[in-house]
Image: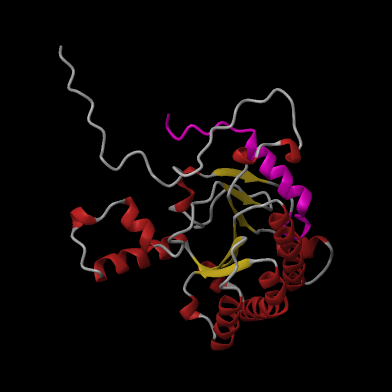
Amino acid sequence: MTRTPLVRPIDAPPTAHEPGAVEAPERTAGPTLDETPASELPRHVAIIMDGNRRWARARGLPELEGHPAGVEAIRGVLRHARRRGLRVLTLYAFSRENWARSDDEVVALFGLLEAAIRSETDELRAQGVRVRMIGRTDELPPETRASIEDALDATAGGTEMLLNIAFNYAGRTELVDAVRRIVAAGLRPDEVDEATIAAALYTAGTPDPDLVIRTGGEQRLSNFLIWQSAYAELVTTETLWPDFGPEALDAAVLEFASRQRRFGR
């Protein structure tokens, strides 16, 4: 029987990882990160920072004490990521589901964000790090929005690294907002493809994450970058976020470099 010729969809394969997508060769030995070619390292690392409250409970502290410890971990990881030459770092700081937590905890998280932005903006600018917030920032308190806008303005010229802070963020909400933008633009159904949707996301113009790290032992995305992570490598660790530091980041990046990435090939 004659086979019908294979006709590929015109928009396949996905274009998210075309620039710089490199398949890592198999390894028989374990090189250090310094010995790993830059082409095998991720450009964009996204982190689900989980475990602040469990970290505090394990030390007999009030749960809220875990969040300042988590902010300290961010400082160390960010500086190390910059030294390692990562181009984009995305941190999941506050999900829209986190509104279900107590008023005290939500207010504390907002306060920590404002304080961290105020204290770190000068260093971020000096290091060439540009800050971008992704999420529904219009739903945040006015003082929080003001701190965010100040940081965005102050670091707008950064060219060495992009720091995305996912705050009041949810992947499904992002898709809803993208669809609303597309509908508002009046596009016809046949004009909508993957590139159209990607351009309407909060992360428009940013390469998709190559590596998603989740701390705290859970093994799910929890509504984080669900479109962008379609071809990301996932690394989970039992380490609670406040204990996650430069060595743990290096270990996750080495794990990424050891994997073969075929993208359906």
Image quadrant in which you'd find residue 174: bottom left
Residue that appears at 51% across and 57% down: 224
Res 167 visible = no
Identify which residue is drawn at 53% across, 36% down: 22
Residue range highlighted in magenta: 240-265
Residue shown at 75% from the left, 62% from the top: 73
**In the shown orientation, is residue 233 left or right of residue 55?**
left
Residue 1, above or below 206: above
User: Does residue 197 appear left or right of residue 153 in this picture?
Assistant: left
Asked if residue 217 is positioned above or below residue 69 in the image, the reply reads above
Along the horizontal axis of the image, is 43 left or right of 6?
right
Foreground: 95 or 54? 95
- What colour scheme governs how the chains and residues are painted in the rendered image of this protein? secondary structure
State the image coordinates of residue 113 (x, y, percent, origin top left): 65, 76
Residue most extreme to the top:
1
x and y, in percent, of residue 46 in the image = 59, 54
Q: Position of residue 24 (x, y in %)?
A: 58, 32
**Does 154 appear in magenta?**
no
Q: Is residue 128 visible?
A: yes
Q: Residue at x 60, y 33 (%)?
A: 259
Q: x and y percent of residue 39 in the render?
A: 60, 39
